[in-house]
Image (cartoon, grey):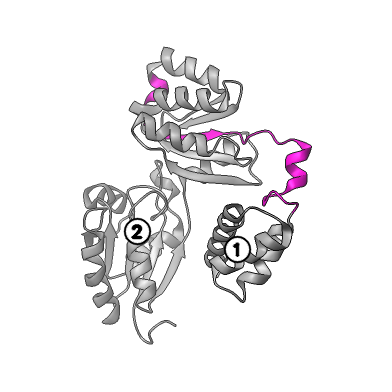
Amino acid sequence: MAIEAAGRLYVVATPIGNLGDLSVRAREILLSVSLIAAEDTRHTGVLLKAHGVQTPQMSLHDHNEHDRAGDIIERLRQGASVALVSDAGTPAISDPGFELVRAVAAAGFEVVAIPGPCAAIAALSIGALPTDRFCFEGFLPARGAARRKRLQSLATEARTLVLYEAPHRLREALQDCAAVFGGERSATVAREITKMHEMTYRGPLRELLSRAAADADFSRGEIVLLIAGAPQTPADEDRGADGHGGALDRVLKILLAELPLKQAASLAARIIEARDNEAYKRALVLKQESASQS
């Protein structure tokens, strides 16, 4: 429950390139709050100047977010409202902000979303890959072995994968994706979305990898990598997400409402004759999904 007469934390999405993409509402919030918590005050200063906003800023980034949270909560307690912004796009989406939002919410203050640009969603909208179901993975691990291990865990993922990648690692990432998923898997590289040199490349992973090797511009700027989900066979669809035609999920949902997770998983495995570790992993997924929806 929000504290009466306290300030609010506004999570404000800002442009990912084109400064004209700041919404009217976002500008009004940035003008009205007492303080803007920004990932890089110099970067955000350019945006604020372009829109005539002179609100004071405070830096809030990965290295000081925990310490800054207490200061911001004290300001909210005194009735001031604060806007949280990142360098580009929506805060807390592969950007700083999660720790602050969690701390502010836990302290009982209202957190309000001011939606707007997000590179992942923008790329999906133009990527020409299925968008009805997708899986956002953020940045892949920088080291090759760890990156390949992560990709192996996603090899059978049926949803469209959405990844962020640093330009200097794009070629290696595409090489690993082609090796793990197969060179014929459809993919899209969206580069510099909304900026002057925006480009979108679509095709099989093997073609995108060849393009990355031949074209220096391909690996420049901010990059979103989309990869089509793994092809599903009729047998896969019949088994459902839980591998048992939905029976395991149905039983787990009932048991999880009454029992601790481990006990619910063990009992569900016995009821539908599933493996204990399989039931336990599925129970964890359902528990996390339930928590995110509450």
Identify the residue at horizontal 60%, vertical 40% (top origin).
157
Q: Give SS at disc 2.
A: loop
- How many residues crowd mark 1 within 10 Å: few (<14), some (14–19), many (20+)? many
- Position of the N terminus by quadrant: bottom left
Q: Which residue is mark 1?
A: 265
Dividing the image into 4 quarters, which one contains the C terminus? bottom right
Q: x%, y% of residue 62?
A: 27, 53
Residue drawn 25% across and 76% down?
Answer: 75
Asked whether 44 or 273 is in front, the reply is 273
> In the image, 207: left or right of 149?
right
Image coordinates for residue 197, horizontal then vertical, percent: 42, 28
Relative to 135, 16 lies left or right = left
Circle 2 residue: 97
- Where does residue 203 sit, x and y in percent of width and height? 59, 23
Say which of 135 and 120 sits in front: 135
| Residue 97 position by quadrant | bottom left
Q: Nearer the viewer, residue 247 or 55?
A: 247
The residue at the point 33 percent across, 27 percent down is 168
Q: Which residues are magenta?
A: 217-245
Q: Amino acid at mark 1?
A: Ala
Q: Residues within 10 Å of mark 2 (few under 14, many from 20)?
A: many
